[in-house]
């Protein structure tokens, strides 16, 4: 149910843009929330942006005003549009989905996609 696959990573110059996509084997609307996380070398994984099932979004302070998380319901995809990118945005970006039932809360993760921003 929760297989997630990210795409869209790559190399971009500082100030440039990239769009990441995450597609799932399940209907993304079935998840209670979906998020993008990232992990830079030597650092802990951190939350970048989150979108709840009702569409409410949250962003890390470091990306506010530059990144936009959205759901593409027609294509069953979670997107992250990244503008004005900076070298410190370099990381492996992971898609995450949370499914809550009466019995348990389950998290699903993608395999990650590398994003590199050159100065």
Image (cartoon, rainbow, N blue to C red):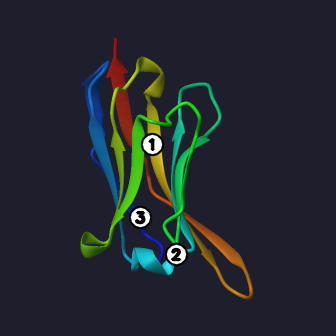
**Neighbourhood count class around disc 1 (C-alpha, 10 Å): few under 14, some 14–19, many 20 upward:** many
**Neighbourhood count class around disc 3 (C-alpha, 10 Å): few under 14, some 14–19, many 20 upward:** many
Number of the label disc, if any, that sits on residue 4: 3
Instruction: Residue at 43%, 47% (x, y): give it.
Output: 112
Q: Which residue is mark 2?
A: 31
Vertical position of residue 58 compared to residue 109: above or below: above
Number of the label disc, if any, that sits on residue 108: none
Vertical position of residue 86 compared to residue 72: above or below: above
Q: Which residue is mark 1?
A: 93
Instruction: Residue at 41%, 40% (x, y): give it.
Output: 67
29, 98: nearer the viewer: 29
Give the secondary structure at mark 2.
loop
**Neighbourhood count class around disc 2 (C-alpha, 10 Å): few under 14, some 14–19, many 20 upward:** some
- Give the Cα distance between marks 2 and 3: 12 Å
Circle nearer the viewer, 2 or 3: 2
Vertical position of residue 4 compared to residue 113: above or below: below
Vertical position of residue 71 compared to residue 90: above or below: below
Would you say 70 lies left or right of 98 here?
left
Residue 75: image x %, image y %? Answer: 25, 71
Give the secondary structure at mark 3.
strand
């Amino acid at each position: 149910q929760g297989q997630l696959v990210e795409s869209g990573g790559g190399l971009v110059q500082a100030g440039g843009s990239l769009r990441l996509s995450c597609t799932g084997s399940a209907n993304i609307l079935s998840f209670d929330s979906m998020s993008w996380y990232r992990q830079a070398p030597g650092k802990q994984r951190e939350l970048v942006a989150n979108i709840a099932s009702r569409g409410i979004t949250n962003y890390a302070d470091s990306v506010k005003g530059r990144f936009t998380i959205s759901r593409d319901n027609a294509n069953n995809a979670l997107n992250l549009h990244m503008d004005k990118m900076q070298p410190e945005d370099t990381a492996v970006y992971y898609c995450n989905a949370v499914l809550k039932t009466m019995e348990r809360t389950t998290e699903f993760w993608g395999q990650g996609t590398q994003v590199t921003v050159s100065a």
